[in-house]
Amino acid sequence: MILNCIAVDDEPLALGLVSKFIEQTPFLNLVGKYASAVDALKAIHTQKIDLIFLDIQMPDLNGIELARVQNKGADKPRIIFTTAYNQFAIEGYKVDALDYLLKPFNYEEFLRAAQKALNYAELLNKPATQAVVVNEPGHTDNNYLFLKVEYQLVRIALDDILYIEGLKDYVKVYLKNTEKAILSLTSLKALEEKLPPKRFMRVHRSFIVSLDKITTMTKNSVHIGKRTITIGDQYKDAFAQFVGKWS
């Protein structure tokens, strides 16, 4: 699979280096290089581009702003940021970047990021008979959930999920057989819409539980392992119907 790429950087040396790295990578095809994000935006709207290597600090329109105003559909170009400033990492994560290369970076680091983009593109293009077809991070089928975790898509088996906790713009997914939760940039509401309702239930403004992982329950709380989760007032009627099936 070949990814059509553009490089965007207002520093000529940096632009030349990224362009050279793209040209020496077999699965990347350089279709343009731009010293201005405004010029790059025009190219994005007129060419088939799969991947953008994008600087952040640029005049007129910076890289974060370009990422926000480009196409929003599932076929939008993916972005790998190339910048000398690590303070933009969180902003890069929020605009759904695949990776964040901190200058100066070498070809090995570049290649790892490019490979991540290739893996993502191949995942999107796999037939449904071979794997889950992922349209956007957060898509599920009956068996798996794909979440954006630290600039990559992570496949999580629904059977492994114990419960999910919402933390403003993030969620923490707690899994069986592991102590460390997975942190992903998405809302609990968005994730709730992706999960099969027969297997998961929102029981609190901050919690979704896996119904088959509940060990004990009352009308006011559920217990999953050592964790006790209170049933929120607005969710009690729906949960009471679930409890009634077992009483």
Image (cartoon, rainbow, N blue to C red):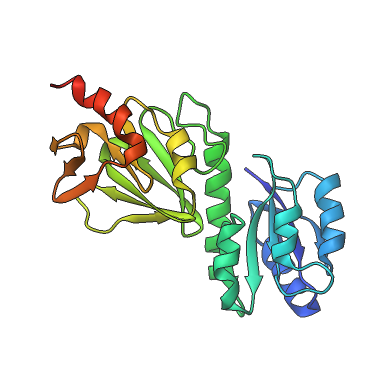
Query: Residue at coordinates 74% horizontally, 46% vertically from top-left?
Result: 71
Q: Residue at x 64, y 39 (%)?
A: 74
Q: How far from the left and from the top, in percent, is residue 7?
A: 75, 63
Residue at position x 49%, y 41% in the image: 190
State whether residue 164 appears in this view. Answer: yes
For residue 82, above or below residue 31? below
Question: Residue furthest toward the top?
Answer: 245
Residue 96 horizontal side relative to residue 15, left or right = left
Up-down: is 226 above or below 39? Answer: above
Q: Nearer the viewer, residue 36 or 59?
A: 59
Q: Identify which residue is drawn at 54% across, 69% down.
A: 109
Q: Which quadrant of the view contains residue 145?
A: top left
Horizontal side of 145 relative to 233 (left or right) equals right
User: Residue 199 location in percent, x, y?
Assistant: 31, 29
Question: As drawn, which residue projects farthest toward the front?
Answer: 233
- Indicate the quadrant containing the N terminus: top left, top right, bottom left or bottom right: top right
Q: How many numbered dots are placed on residues in this image?
A: 0
Q: Residue 138: x, y in percent? A: 48, 41
In the image: residue 113, left or right of residue 178: right
Q: Is residue 222 found left or right of 183 in the rendered image?
A: left
Which quarter of the rendered picture does the C terminus lie within?
top left
Q: To which quarter of the image does residue 204 belong? A: top left
Asked whether 7 or 188 is in front, the reply is 188
Q: Is residue 176 visible?
A: no
